[in-house]
Amino acid sequence: MNLKNLKNDVLVQNTKNLIKEENRILAKVLAHFQEIESRKLYLELGYGSLFLFAVKELGYTEASAQRRIEAVRFINKTPEARPMVEKGDLNLSNLSLLERVSREAQATHAQNVAALNLIQEEPNSAAEAETKLRGYFKLENKKRVVKIEMDEETYQLWLVTKAKLGESKDAVAIKKLCESQVEKPQKKVRQAPTTRTAGVVLKRELLKKADHQCEYVSPSNGRRCENRHFLQADHKVPYFLGGKTVQQNMRILCQQHNVLVYQNLKEQKIF
């Protein structure tokens, strides 16, 4: 189709029709995200988080992936938002904003519905919408602004680090990175093989062997999980089946893949 041949009114109407279709597609994409998260499919495919799955498997930019995930989280809590998305009355940016502010305020369902209606009252810029919502939830702005200058090589390295941490926001990624580097002082004790929990020394050895990365490998595509946060020591042969707490029987899994392995064992009726 040569758009240059279209009359002005036809061009405008076609654009409006496409926007309606775009809204319907967005609603369907978010519904698919919901189902993928519900099934934890990203874990089976070797991704430690829905965010990493959206970026690496689906090809979204970090910011685009984060907005869609936040939108899904808000719709999960507030189903009333779904038809608004389909009709085009609620855009992705506002959905993402609603989730962030709602989460910070630990809002109830009734408060979320009220906030949903509040943001629909009149057109607002992103800043105005956030100010309005924070005012409704009576939230104070406690954020500190820190400016960091870096060269291009360092910036690219930081982007890779954020992706591995499963976060798109700089502040959250920095917090996770700092937390991962701070260990609570614990006494070094000799690890008994009959002890269920891996001690500090054993876990440190396991982390070093795993290169501080989840060792889960997807059976369907051979992909190893890239998650490097919230890592846990897991028994290959379960402890309750006689598995020893020794390096040969231990591996490093992220929290979510540890849960997935446990659920798979449960489904197989091993216990």
Image: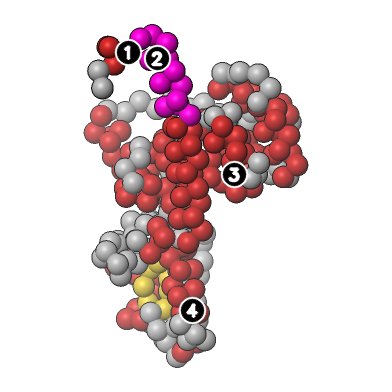
Counting from the top left corner in percent of width and height, residue 178 is at: 45, 46
Task: Point out which mark residue 10 bears.
Answer: 2
Question: Circle 3 is placed at which residue position?
Answer: 75
Q: Nearer the viewer, mark 2 or mark 4?
A: 2
Task: Point out which mark residue 6 bears.
Answer: 1
Residue 96: quarter of image? top right
Q: Nearer the viewer, mark 2 or mark 3?
A: 2
Q: Which residues are magenta?
A: 6-20
Visible in this render: residue 271?
yes
Task: Point out which mark residue 154 bears.
Answer: none
Horizontal relation, residue 97 to residue 155: left or right: right
Q: CA distance from mark 2 to mark 4?
A: 57 Å
Q: Is residue 19 magenta?
A: yes
Q: Main secondary structure of the magenta part?
A: helix
Do callouts 2 and 1 mark residues in contact (Cβ within 8 Å)?
A: yes
- What amino acid does circle 1 point to? Leu
Residue 170: quarter of image? top left
Work out whether residue 33 or residue 196 is closer to the camera in this orientation and state it: 33
Counting from the top left corner in percent of width and height, residue 146 is at: 48, 27
> Reading the chain from its start, which is encountered first: label 3 or label 4?
3
